[in-house]
Image (cartoon, grey):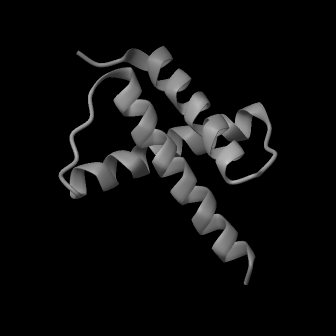
Amino acid sequence: MGMGILGFLLVGLLAGFIAEKVMNRNHGLIKNLVVGVIGSFVGGFLATSLGIAFFGFVGNLIVATVGAIVILWVFSLLAGR
């Protein structure tokens, strides 16, 4: 059974917020949500590609946070050029 749209948005928001703090950035609520939601797709793709299984709210949050950190890291590389 899936988390539903509200759970998905909550995970995205929390993942974006955590990634913002880890990467020492200062974004708003909407940007955190967008980065977290996109990060959940990136993290899910990376986890399944590496054969890592994740379950439940905490597993999804960890995967989404890692994906959001990767997104912010790639953006910082591209912005540095």
Which quadrant of the figure has residue 79? bottom right
Q: Is residue 25 left or right of residue 52?
A: right
Establish if 32 lies above or below 22.
above
Which quadrant of the figure has residue 77? bottom right
Residue at 39% in and 22% down: 57
Residue at 65% in and 65% down: 75
Give percent across and percent down for residue 19: 62, 45
Residue at 66% in and 75% down: 78
Give percent across and percent down for residue 22: 65, 48
Give percent across and percent down for residue 81: 73, 84
Residue ranking furthest to the left: 51
Q: In this view, does 13 lie to the left or right of 64?
A: right
Residue at 62% in and 38% down: 18
Q: Is residue 3 left or right of residue 67?
A: left
Which residue is more in the foreground, 14 or 31? 14
Establish if 28 lies above or below 11.
below
